[in-house]
């Protein structure tokens, strides 16, 4: 049995690849167009196919050649403000191309599909923490593009007889504890990455977008999940499906929120460095707070986080940014 990881040279996908390799899976194949991913993030034993998930001829050939039985689909565009300014680009990348991938998977007999979704499908939830049965109500094109893909996946699975797990991520952060991979995109917008870059002098300042939200300090509240814990959630989802488990939609988070200003203070404390923080207006499409109702994934899949500690997550991110800067100077 082989696993195809789309977007596997990117941030979260490369951690999934490491988890699969560490677990001794016989064959792991990565499909990535390398627009935001890096071939050096992959172990040498992993086969990399450079291409687009919507190239149905390429995907068909890859699935049949490597006898792919399971797909973990990470390839996507993910920046909320960009989705507001370029909605059609996001519907193309996240919805239209996912539709093509699902069609190819169904046509070639792929048995299992794990889909990288997002807490953005909930929009501005009235219930916090957010349970999976809360009605989806996305407030930006990014969330809508992912929700449409969830619908397509469920309908296709019912029609074509494959099983799936949808994992709705909250805010992903940190890096591989062994330092093998991390968030490497130069212009990434993840708060902890940007803050660690500011602490290391790689940015002149950090912008805080909105300090007038109805939260404890006026800045947005988010649930930060460590990226290796998220990769492990995919691993237990894969084992669940291969053991004959039913299709599921699950949140991936810790059930606890930190504000933007609180995260910045942790980065300053862990790094031992101060940096300029500029208070800026709200960005379009950002909800005030979103925290995972995280009980179901533990109950259904037995997922047990190992890295639920913001100090450790920040320390991992700092170490990765330092090593990445050294790599880029070579």
Image (cartoon, grey):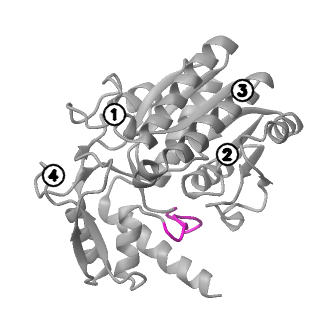
Q: CA distance from mark 4 to mark 1?
A: 18 Å
Image quadrant occupied by the N terminus: top right
Disc 3 versus disc 2: nearer the observer: 3
Q: Is residue 156 left or right of residue 320?
A: right
Residue 220 position in % (x across, y down): 23, 53
Which residue position is annotated with label 1?
Answer: 122
Going from N to C along the chain, the mark reached first, 4 or 1, is 1
Indicate whether 107 appears above or below 232: above
Q: Which residues are magenta?
A: 176-187
Residue 247 position in % (x across, y down): 54, 20
Assign a secondary structure to mark 4.
loop
Which residue position is annotated with label 3?
Answer: 103
Q: CA distance from mark 2 to mark 4?
A: 36 Å
Few, some or many C-alpha atoms within 10 Å of disc 4 (few <14, some 14-19, many ≥20)?
some
What residue lies at 51% left-to-right and 29% top-to-bottom? Answer: 148
What residue lies at 27% left-to-right and 43% top-to-bottom? Answer: 290
Q: Are marks 3 and 4 in contact (CB under 8 Å)?
A: no
Q: CA distance from mark 3 to mark 4?
A: 42 Å
Which residue position is annotated with label 4?
Answer: 213
Q: CA distance from mark 3 to mark 2?
A: 15 Å
Assign a secondary structure to mark 3.
helix
Which residue position is annotated with label 2?
Answer: 6
Q: Is residue 262 magenta?
A: no
- Where residue 278 sits, quadrant-wise, is bottom left
Few, some or many C-alpha atoms within 10 Å of disc 3 (few <14, some 14-19, many ≥20)?
some
What residue lies at 16% left-to-right and 60% top-to-bottom? Answer: 211
């Amino acid at each position: 049995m082989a696993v195809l990881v789309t977007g596997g040279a990117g941030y979260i996908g490369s951690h999934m690849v490491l988890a699969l390799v560490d677990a001794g899976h016989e064959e792991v194949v990565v499909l990535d167009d390398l627009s935001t991913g890096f071939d050096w993030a992959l172990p040498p034993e992993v086969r990399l196919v450079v291409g687009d998930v919507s190239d149905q001829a390429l995907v068909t050939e890859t699935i049949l050649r490597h006898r792919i039985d399971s797909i973990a689909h990470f390839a996507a565009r993910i920046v909320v403000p960009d989705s507001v300014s370029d909605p059609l680009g996001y519907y193309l990348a996240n919805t239209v191309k996912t539709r093509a991938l699902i069609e190819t998977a169904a046509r070639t007999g792929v048995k299992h599909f794990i889909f990288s979704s997002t807490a953005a499908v909930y929009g501005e939830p009235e219930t916090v923490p957010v349970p999976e049965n809360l009605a989806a109500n996305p407030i930006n094109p990014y969330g809508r593009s992912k929700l449409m893909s969830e619908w397509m996946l469920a309908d296709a699975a019912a029609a074509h007889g494959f099983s799936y797990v949808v994992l709705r991520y909250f805010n992903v952060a940190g890096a591989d504890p062994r330092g093998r991979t991390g968030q490497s995109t130069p212009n990434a917008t993840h708060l902890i990455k940007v803050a660690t870059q500011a602490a290391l002098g790689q940015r002149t300042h950090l912008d805080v977008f909105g300090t007038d939200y109805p939260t404890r300090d006026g800045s947005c509240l988010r649930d930060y999940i460590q990226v290796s814990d998220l990769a492990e959630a995919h691993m237990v989802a894969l084992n669940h499906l291969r053991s004959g488990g039913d299709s599921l939609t699950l949140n991936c988070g810790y059930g606890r929120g930190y504000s933007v200003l609180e995260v910045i203070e942790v980065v300053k404390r862990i790094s031992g460095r101060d940096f300029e923080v500029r208070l800026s207006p709200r960005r379009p499409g950002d909800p005030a707070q979103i925290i995972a109702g995280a009980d179901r994934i533990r109950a259904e899949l037995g997922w047990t986080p190992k890295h639920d500690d913001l100090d450790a997550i920040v320390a991992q991110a700092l170490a990765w940014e330092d090593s990445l800067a050294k790599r880029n100077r070579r």
